[in-house]
Image (cartoon, grey):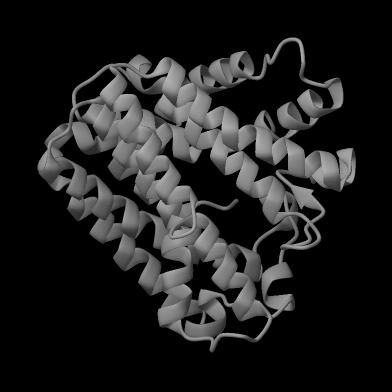
Amino acid sequence: MADAQSIYLAQINESYRERIEHQLLAYCQFGDGCPDILAEAICYSLLAPGKRLRPILVLMAAEMCGTEWQRAMPAACAVEMVHAYSLIHDDLPAMDDDDLRRGRPTCHLVYGEANAILAGDALLTRAFEVLAADLRPAAVAAACCVELARAAGAVGMVGGQADDLRAEQGELIHDVKLLESVHLRKTGAMLRVALRMGGIVAGADATQLENLDEYGKSLGLAFQIVDDLLDHGGDEQQLGKRAGKDSGRGKMTFPGLLGVEASRIRARTLIQQARDAIRSFGDSAGGLEALAQFVLERKK
């Protein structure tokens, strides 16, 4: 990535991240009735250091479609809450059985499995509380609730995770078609919905939403391919999680099915498709174009 583009993306990402972190902290205040250990487990996972890619996509899409980032902040935080819940549950022994997340012990190792499950449950429900209570007008809040529920549910992220587990257990034949289907739901659905929600908050028309969706679809697959490549040969300290774990467990990965070089070519092609999808937005798409390049070149 060119130095100027790197600096530009770092500046806008830092600006967005600071705003997102501030609001996430505010949403972590539950008040009377929430047990201390549950509140601690929720905050431990939600406020852990991270890229905040999904909420940043919400804010970028909203601004690109012509509205102020402040209007989209509840949607941005809701997406991050659902993402954090999914990570807590994915790390559980019954799922991916991970012991390291974002450079720290996973939630269930620190607070126990039961409290980790409940923390994930609380984050999922909190996300929809935030959308319903803080997004305006009501029709926009309702539309975003539907979008997020569909993306996170049985035909989206959860469905993708279910098929990923079935494939790992040998119940499904490993091939590229299945792998892409899994990750269009497991990873891609939440990136796509982040962009769509930003557009909905901004009053984007059907064509703009379709273009955002195409960008998110290509970005999501590219993100997963790069993730698989990093798991295959990345630096564990940089990653903040165990390297080589997926392939070691027999999980489907892009390098495992396509090979390393073919996976890199596929990722580059997808990133170009993502950039092409938002070309109609003109200069206002600069942030999303730079972010797409970052996804391709990231090291963690």
The quadrant where residue 273 appears: bottom left
Q: Position of residue 14 (x, y in %)?
A: 49, 25
Residue occupying image coordinates x 80% and y 25%:
40
Please identify the residue farthest to the top as the structure is shown.
32
Residue 225 appearing in the image: yes
Q: Is residue 186 left or right of residue 236?
A: left
Q: Position of residue 125 (x, y in %)?
A: 58, 33
Residue 190 appearing in the image: no
Q: Is residue 171 left or right of residue 261?
A: right
Q: Nearer the viewer, residue 68 or 159?
A: 159
The quadrant where residue 37 appears: top right
The image shows residue 200, relative to residue 215, as above or below, that is: above
Q: Is residue 18 left or right of residue 264?
A: right
- Total numbered badges shown on the rendered structure: 0
Q: Nearer the viewer, residue 135 or 259?
A: 135
Q: Position of residue 267 (x, y in %)?
A: 39, 66
The quadrant where residue 262 appears: bottom left
Residue occupying image coordinates x 60% and y 63%:
230
Please identify the residue farthest to the bottom as the structure is shown.
173
Residue occupying image coordinates x 19% and y 23%:
66
Q: Nearer the viewer, residue 143 or 253?
A: 143
The image shows residue 151, relative to residue 35, as above or below, that is: below
Q: Is residue 56 left or right of residue 270?
A: right
Q: Position of residue 294 (x, y in %)?
A: 42, 47
